[in-house]
């Protein structure tokens, strides 16, 4: 187990993943925004974050929130932080060339917006990494976390169905996808009482 992050393999089973990815492939896609800039709802900046955010059914979003809330107490204990609830999950599709530059998700003194209440970031991988010759897999797209400035990053192990959790102030990035499509769900556990 890494000191930078926590993993839970098979957080989602194959049948659940197959259903969610099927819905994602049929869903409306829009460029995902970057938060913490001028506009409260974020702005699209393809030089910083190039990925599609997918519109999902209420039932699918609620199912993921329910599973995340079931895991909340264990993650709260693991990281030693009080967690009240999680944000609505984002369902993402990274295509060839898509990425997200090194950034932090919140809980930092650098910005004073709603992200200051984010304590733990979550990424759930829905795709299987593999060679370009393996149908249905993706390459590149590694989630890399940085412990301290100027340290080399640590690649999180993200197999299909794996949940990765880390402190929201941890600098991290998603490297460019080299082939295929990388489907993922992200969310954030918070310490405030806002619903």
Image (spheres, rainbow, N blue to C red):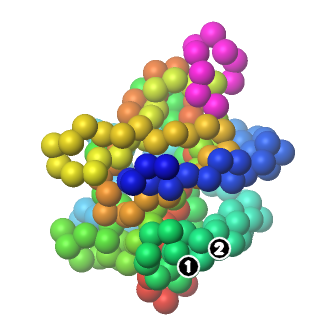
Q: Residue at x 44, y 75 (%)?
A: 80
Q: Residue at x 70, y 66 (%)?
A: 67
Q: Is residue 167 above or below residue 181?
A: below
Q: Nearer the viewer, residue 40 or 59?
A: 59
Q: Distance from label 1 to label 2 (Cα)?
A: 7 Å
- Percent across and percent down for residue 117 are 38, 78
Q: Is residue 88 left or right of residue 81?
A: right
Q: Is residue 38 above or below residue 31?
A: below
Q: Which mark is residue 101?
A: none
Q: Is residue 53 visible?
A: no
The extreme front residue here reads 1
- Percent across and percent down for residue 37 are 25, 62
Check if mark 1's residue and mark 2's residue have beta carbons within 8 Å. Answer: yes
Residue extent of the magenta highlight: 128-136
Image quarter in which the C terminus is found: bottom right
Q: Nearer the viewer, residue 97 or 40?
A: 97
| Quarter of image, res 49 | top left
Q: What kind of secondary structure does the magenta stretch mostly adopt?
A: loop
Q: Which mark is residue 85?
A: 1
- Percent across and percent down for residue 75 are 54, 69
Which residue carries the number 2 mark? 69
Q: Is residue 47 visible?
A: yes
Q: Residues within 10 Å of mark 1 (few under 14, many from 20)?
A: some
């Amino acid at each position: 187990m890494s000191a930078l992050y926590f993993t839970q393999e098979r957080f989602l089973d194959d049948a659940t993943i197959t259903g969610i990815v099927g819905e994602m492939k049929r869903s409306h896609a829009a460029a995902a925004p970057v938060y913490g800039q001028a506009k409260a709802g974020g702005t699209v900046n393809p030089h910083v974050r190039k990925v599609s955010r997918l519109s999902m059914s209420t039932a699918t979003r609620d199912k993921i929130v329910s599973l995340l809330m079931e895991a909340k107490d264990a993650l709260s204990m693991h990281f030693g932080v009080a967690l009240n609830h999680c944000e609505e999950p984002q369902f993402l599709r990274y295509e060839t060339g898509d990425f997200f530059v090194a950034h932090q998700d919140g809980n930092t003194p650098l910005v004073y917006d709603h992200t200051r209440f984010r304590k733990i970031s979550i990424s759930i991988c829905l795709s299987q990494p593999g060679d370009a010759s393996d149908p249905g897999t993706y390459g590149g797209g590694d989630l890399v976390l940085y412990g301290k400035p100027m340290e080399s990053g640590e690649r999180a192990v993200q197999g299909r169905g794996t949940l990765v959790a880390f402190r929201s102030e941890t600098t991290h990035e998603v490297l460019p996808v080299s082939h295929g499509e990388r489907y993922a769900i992200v969310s954030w556990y918070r310490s405030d009482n806002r619903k």
